[in-house]
Image: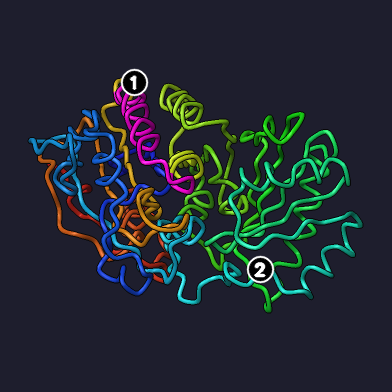
């Protein structure tokens, strides 16, 4: 019988937490980016003692960083292998799928007329078509039009996304989700090949009052192209519980249960609740989206830094509740440097911080060539088979008996 070193594994993705430009950043026009470092610089300093105690200072020297012994944690930098810098491909890569053919972008052109015509015919309501647009700006500029005309606002970004904004008084959430399902079928057609359709409900009385309802956001993602480490865990009888938008990112494939969140704080409280519930074995997979949606895309480095400090305080509560043989992994899925030009994601390394109270020899490790090393390590911990066709190399230091 296989020995399971860590019966429970908690993976927390700080959405967009990059820690310095990747070696191929120039290919993406992202040279010089550093989400964490530049946010710390904008704030003057960052107070994130828990992350420092896990080795963050070893892998990114930022204002407020501290290099110190961390016997209970291993730290490293992960480089993305997928030809993309998107939430979808980043999470898929963690679970073993490297995307060689990126999803199509309509950042500079807007959506093709054929797609617009097909969507309007299916939904039968007016549509305000935008190209790349800030989501909050879209509802400010066109929310009143949407309410008056009982129409939808559709826009894209630097990611492969088809975003649909609608007022909840005009389009109740279930109706908006139905409309998004229509868009998902169209976006799956090979000529479009769009990664995600995103429901963006909003409320309010006028342009200055409109705001998005984060708890009702839904991501209808392209279905994973093959099995993942998470789906194999589920098939083996383990729990795979998703907090935040993670279940949407995988289209519920390989997910045994989960819940959406209203904010990063809500996501951390729900993750802590899973830590305190000891009656399960497997993986809890959390995404904290506000780093990206509220601060990265909005180019607010000070807000991003404060959000990191808040996360660090919740991390302290989580660590106190961990069992002796739990494994906690903190990482990112791409960068989104708020000090960089534009509003798009940035091609960066992401952190890999692996903490367990059972570790004795934690230290800085060499850079890893793919996010998939995270998933491969989890798979081997649980003794999974049929994983040779999935990407990644295990981080063996974590699995050593005297680690």
Q: Quadrant of residue 349?
A: bottom left
Question: From what the image shows, is residue 353 above or below residue 26?
Answer: above
Q: Main secondary structure of the magenta part?
A: helix
Residue 228, position in %: x, y? 48, 60
Disc nearest the viewer among 2 and 1: 2
Q: How is the image coloured?
A: rainbow
Depicted 311 relative to depicted 156: above or below: above
Q: Residue at x 73, y 32 (%)?
A: 203
Residue 30 coordinates in the image, percent (x, y):
34, 65
- Taking 158 as reference, is 233 above or below it? above
- Residue at position x 58%, y 50% from top? 134
SS at circle 2: loop
- Whether residue 1 can be seen here: no
Highlighted magenta segment, given as a residue range:
296-319
In the picture of the structure, the residue carrying the numbered disc 2 is: 110
* Image x and y of residue 197, in percent: 67, 56
Q: Which residue is mark 1?
A: 317
Q: Is residue 62 magenta?
A: no
User: Is disc 1 placed on a helix, strand or loop?
Assistant: helix
Which image quadrant is residue 12 in?
top left
Is residue 388 found left or right of 143 in the rendered image? left
Q: Is residue 298 magenta?
A: yes
Q: Nearer the viewer, residue 311 or 346?
A: 346
Q: CA distance from mark 2 to mark 1?
A: 44 Å
Q: Residues within 10 Å of mark 1 (few under 14, many from 20)?
A: few
Q: Residue at x 33, y 54 (%)?
A: 374
């Amino acid at each position: 019988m296989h020995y399971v070193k860590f019966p429970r594994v908690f993976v927390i993705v700080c959405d967009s937490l990059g820690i310095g430009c990747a070696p191929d950043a120039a290919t993406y026009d992202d040279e010089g980016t550093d989400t964490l470092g530049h946010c710390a610089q904008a704030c003057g300093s960052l107070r994130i003692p828990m992350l420092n105690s896990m080795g963050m200072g070893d892998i990114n020297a930022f204002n407020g960083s501290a290099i110190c012994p961390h016997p209970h944690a291993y730290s490293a930098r992960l480089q993305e292998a997928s030809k993309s810098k998107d939430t979808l491909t980043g999470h898929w890569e963690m679970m073993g799928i490297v995307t060689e053919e990126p999803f199509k972008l309509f950042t500079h052109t807007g959506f093709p007329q054929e797609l617009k015509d097909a969507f309007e015919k299916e939904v039968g309501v007016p549509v305000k078509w935008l190209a790349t647009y800030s989501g909050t700006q879209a509802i400010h500029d066109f929310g009143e039009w949407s309410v008056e005309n009982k129409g939808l606002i559709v826009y894209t970004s630097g990611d492969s996304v088809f975003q649909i904004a609608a007022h909840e008084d005009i389009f109740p959430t279930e109706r908006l989700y139905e409309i998004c399902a229509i868009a998902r079928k169209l976006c799956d057609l090979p000529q479009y090949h769009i990664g995600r359709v995103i429901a963006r409900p909003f409320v309010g009385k006028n342009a200055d009052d409109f705001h998005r309802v984060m708890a009702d956001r839904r991501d209808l993602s392209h279905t994973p192209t093959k099995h993942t480490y998470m789906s194999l865990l589920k098939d083996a009888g383990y729990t795979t519980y998703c907090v935040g938008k993670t279940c949407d990112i995988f289209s519920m494939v390989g997910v045994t249960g989960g819940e959406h969140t209203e904010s990063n704080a809500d996501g951390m409280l729900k993750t802590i609740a899973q830590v305190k519930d000891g009656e399960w074995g497997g993986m809890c997979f959390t995404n904290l989206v506000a780093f990206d949606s509220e601060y990265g895309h909005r180019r607010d480095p000070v807000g991003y830094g404060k959000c990191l400090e808040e996360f660090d305080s919740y991390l302290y509560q989580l660590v106190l509740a961990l069992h002796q043989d739990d494994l906690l992994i903190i990482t990112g899925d791409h960068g989104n440097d708020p000090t960089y030009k534009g509003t798009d994601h940035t091609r960066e390394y992401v952190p890999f911080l692996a903490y367990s109270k059972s570790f004795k020899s934690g230290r800085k490790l060499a850079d890893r060539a793919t996010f998939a090393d995270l998933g491969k390590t989890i798979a081997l911990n649980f003794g999974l088979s049929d994983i040779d066709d999935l990407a990644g190399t295990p981080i063996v230091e974590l699995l050593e008996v005297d680690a």
